[in-house]
């Protein structure tokens, strides 16, 4: 009976360390995702501010490039935290 209690205690301690490690990693990833979401928001606002008059999108030479950047930004907007 004492052997079983010893084994279960050891398993409990190992599980506790594993859970603590996973929680720490999860918190690091949550911080990373939050920072990425903030960066995406900033880029979206900045891109809108750059072309608030529509001068870039109307230009033939730069317009196609700006449209592609807008498409990339729209794809990135799907990854923002709500």
Image (cartoon, grey):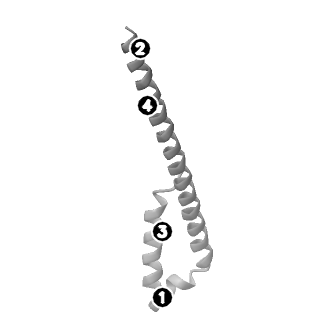
- Per the rendering, the mark at residue 62 is 1
Q: Earlier in the sequence, mark 1 or mark 4?
A: 4
Closer-to-camera residue (10/65): 10
Reading the image, the residue beneath label 4 is 14
Residue 77 image offset from top left, x and y in percent: 49, 61
User: Does residue 37 lie above or below 25 as drawn?
Assistant: below
Q: Secondary structure at mark 2?
A: helix
Q: Secondary structure at mark 3?
A: helix
Q: CA distance from mark 3 to mark 2?
A: 57 Å
Residue 64 image offset from top left, x and y in percent: 42, 83
Q: Earlier in the sequence, mark 1 or mark 3?
A: 1
Question: In the figure, is residue 50 to the left or right of 71?
Answer: right
Q: Earlier in the sequence, mark 2 or mark 4?
A: 2
Q: Earlier in the sequence, mark 3 or mark 2?
A: 2
Judge the density around disc 4: few (<14), some (14-19), many (≥20) Cα neighbours within 10 Å. Answer: few
Q: Nearer the viewer, mark 1 or mark 3?
A: 3
Reading the image, the residue beneath label 3 is 73
Q: Secondary structure at mark 1?
A: helix
Closer-to-camera residue (36/31): 31
């Amino acid at each position: 009976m004492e052997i079983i209690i010893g084994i279960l205690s050891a398993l409990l301690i190992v599980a506790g360390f594993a859970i603590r490690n996973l929680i720490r990693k999860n918190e690091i990833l949550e911080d990373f995702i939050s920072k990425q979401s903030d960066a995406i928001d900033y880029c979206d606002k900045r891109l809108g501010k750059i072309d608030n008059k529509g001068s870039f999108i109307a230009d033939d030479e730069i317009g196609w490039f700006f449209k592609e950047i807008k498409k990339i930004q729209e794809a990135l907007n799907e990854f923002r935290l709500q």
